[in-house]
Image (spheres, helix red, strand yellow):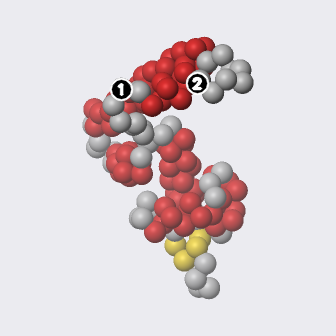
């Protein structure tokens, strides 16, 4: 199966599949003409990677999870450790988003939204506690 067919079957763009090959997550064989040939094993890995990325795992986490998936002597505790750490990161992001929502909701409620130049939203942003954070 060529890369276009693999992309269609896995739902991944061909560019992403090439990237995964470049960083060593998949290693399709090559036909005599040099084109990639994806066997069922590579398709399965690509699908696994697509699902892992959809859950928000980093590339390095995906690499570790894929290695554990392929290791029949793996300890499930190793898999759980990676997933639990990722869950902790997601929960922290959710808490940050809720805090941002609450702050912005307060600022929007405080603004009359009329023709006057006085704006509680701008004042709130200006006087927010500490430097702006980006997650």
Asked which quadrant contains residue 74, the reply is top left
Q: Position of residue 24 (x, y in %)?
A: 41, 64
Residue at 62% x, 85% y: name it: 33
Q: Earlier in the sequence, mark 2 or mark 1?
A: 2
Q: Which residue is the extreme one toward the bottom?
A: 33
Residue at 54% x, 77% y: name it: 30
Measure how far apart labels 2 and 1 are at the Cα level. 18 Å
Res 53 seen here = yes
Which quadrant is the N terminus positioned in? bottom right
Quick one: 121 or 14, which is closer to the camera? 121
At mark 1, the secondary structure is loop
Quick one: 82 or 41, which is closer to the camera? 82
Mark number for residue 73?
Answer: none
Question: Is residue 60 rendered to the left or right of residue 41?
Answer: left
Q: Position of residue 95 (x, y in %)?
A: 42, 22
Which quadrant is the C terminus positioned in? top left
Q: Which residue is mark 1?
A: 129
Dot in front, 2 or 1: 2
Question: Is residue 67 rendered to the left or right of residue 54?
Answer: left
Number of other residues with Cα within 10 Å of mark 1, as a class: few under 14, some 14 to 19, many 20 or more: few
Asked if the residues shown at circle 2 and circle 1 are in contact, with their CB atoms under 8 angstroms apart, the answer is no
Asked which quadrant contains residue 72, the reply is top left
Q: Which residue is mark 2?
A: 119
């Amino acid at each position: 199966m060529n890369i276009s067919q693999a992309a269609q079957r896995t739902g991944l763009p061909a560019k992403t599949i090439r990237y995964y090959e470049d960083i060593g997550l998949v290693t399709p064989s090559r036909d005599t003409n040099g084109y990639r040939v994806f066997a069922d094993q590579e398709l399965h890995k690509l699908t696994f990677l697509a699902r892992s990325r959809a859950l928000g795992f980093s590339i390095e986490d995906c690499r570790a999870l894929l290695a554990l998936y392929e290791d029949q002597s793996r300890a499930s505790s190793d898999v759980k450790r990676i997933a639990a750490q990722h869950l902790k990161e997601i929960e922290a992001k959710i808490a940050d988003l809720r805090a941002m929502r609450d702050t912005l909701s307060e600022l929007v409620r405080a603004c009359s939204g009329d023709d006057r130049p006085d704006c509680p939203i701008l004042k709130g942003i200006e006087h927010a506690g500490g430097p702006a954070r980006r997650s």
